Image: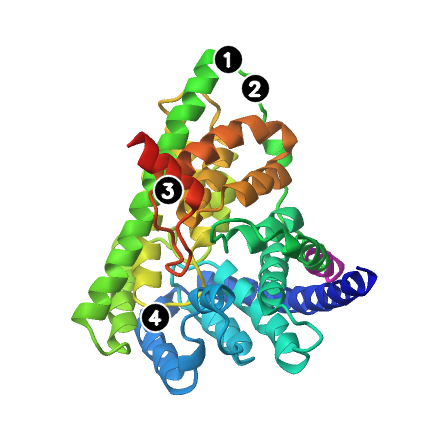
Amino acid sequence: MTKSLVKWTLLSVTVGILAGGAAFCFFKAIGWAIDFRKTHSWIVVFLPVIGVLVAWFYNRYGLTVDGGNNLILDEIHEPREHIPFRIVPMIFISTVVSHLFGASVGREGAAVQMGSGISDQFSKFAGTFFDNRRIVLMVGMSAGFAAIFGTPLAGAVFGIEILLLSSVNFEALFPCLVAAFVGDYTTHILGIVHFNYKPLIHIPPFSIPSLFSAIVAGVIFGLVAKFFVWSLHALKDFFKNKIPNSLYRPFLGGMIVVLFFTLFGSDRYQSLGEDIIHATFLERVHPYDFLGKIFMTVTSVGSGFRGGEVTSLFYIGATLGNALSLILPLAFPLLSALGFVAVFAGASNTPISCLFLSMSLFGSDIGAYAAITIGLSYLFSGHNGIYRSDRQHRLKKIFVNRYN
């Protein structure tokens, strides 16, 4: 037991530091890219060309890592080949470039892939010592997620929960926890400060109207998550079937994004959109913002741009919650917070880690409201999730089959 504890602690601390350092560099690069684009908006017109160049680069040098998060999930479910280290610089550069030229993508995909790409090198070169490769990869996922969002407890659970087959692998809980906390702490030491939402939210006591509002909101969050997942996979399938040459897909998607940007004259739905997410806790935003972000993200990610969907799901959920405050008797900061985590929970099939995420970001008092909305969103979002390599959850399958 002592030997195992020391072994996994050593791995988790090392991966946490490396993933945290990579996340710090990634934060700085993304921040520079977004700032540059905002002051040089004309650069967006080159998005289609950049999409083709990135697709060509992956076709030429990165076919073995082109699966992204799905590749990592497949390797944990059914380990076959080690993940090449080049996944780290390739996803780093391609995601920064996507943000620089205005694609509507996230950043968690890159963080998770960098963390797992780093951690899998230990199982590759020290496989006899770190003999459980599945845990090694989960450690990398947890460290990357926690470092990029500043939520170590949610990151640790995410690294386990996203890989559910029929039960949680609790053997991985300790190393995932250590890696997540070390990854998060490393970014703090290096100077990354995450936005503090807690002072912006007042949690009212439970009442019949507030309980009803939470239930209605949870169902709506789940249905919107289901629509997002369906739209994303439908567009990916459409591009794959209608445009066999993968170089042309991001060109067409980039042209659509540029056209949308030109028509509306605003980058409100491009890149991370963190300024809009923050605004949902301070003021009412456009009630159609969540639809604009769905369209831009589905177009960007579905056509092949790199980065991920999670931050976009935070945006969609927060703006949707803000809009629901027009018809539900709950304050818009609270509904924005609930949407922030509930839409992500429904789209990713990770309700437990999202409950931890809600309390980490918004305070423990939100726990009861979050549990209701997250649980209902999870159940109403359907079987599929944003990661096609994720297996159906037994809990949802049993529940849906029993009550439908």
Q: CA distance from mark 3 to mark 1?
A: 31 Å
Q: Which mark is residue 207?
A: 1
Question: Which of pointers 2 and 1 indicates the residue nearer the eye?
Answer: 1
Nearer the N terminus, badge 2 or badge 3? 2
Q: Which residue is mark 3?
A: 397
Packing grade of label 1 (10 A; few <14, some 14-19, many >=20) is few
Q: State the quadrant of the N terminus.
A: bottom right
Identify the element where label 2 is drawn. loop
Indicate left or right for 304 with 5 as reference.
left
Magenta residues span 183-190
Q: Is residue 20 left or right of residue 393?
A: right
Q: How much space separates mark 3 and mark 4, taking CA atoms? A: 40 Å
Query: Circle 1 sits in a helix, a strand or a loop, which is it?
Result: loop
**Is the stretch drawn in magenta largely helix, strand or loop?**
helix
Residue 58 to residue 377: above or below: below
Which quadrant of the view contains residue 252?
bottom left
Q: Do callouts 2 and 3 mark residues in contact (Cβ within 8 Å)?
A: no
Q: Label 2 to label 4, Cα distance in Å?
A: 45 Å
Q: Amino acid at mark 3?
A: Lys
Decide if residue 259 is in sight here.
no
Task: Give the mark toward the camera: 2 or 4.
Answer: 2
**Residue neighbourhood size for the residue with mark 2, other residues' Cα within 10 Å, grouped as few (<14), some (14–19), many (≥20):** few
Q: Nearer the viewer, residue 228 or 64?
A: 64
Query: In this rendering, is residue 171 above or below 303?
Result: above
**Tags 2 and 1 in contact by the CB under 8 Å rule?**
yes
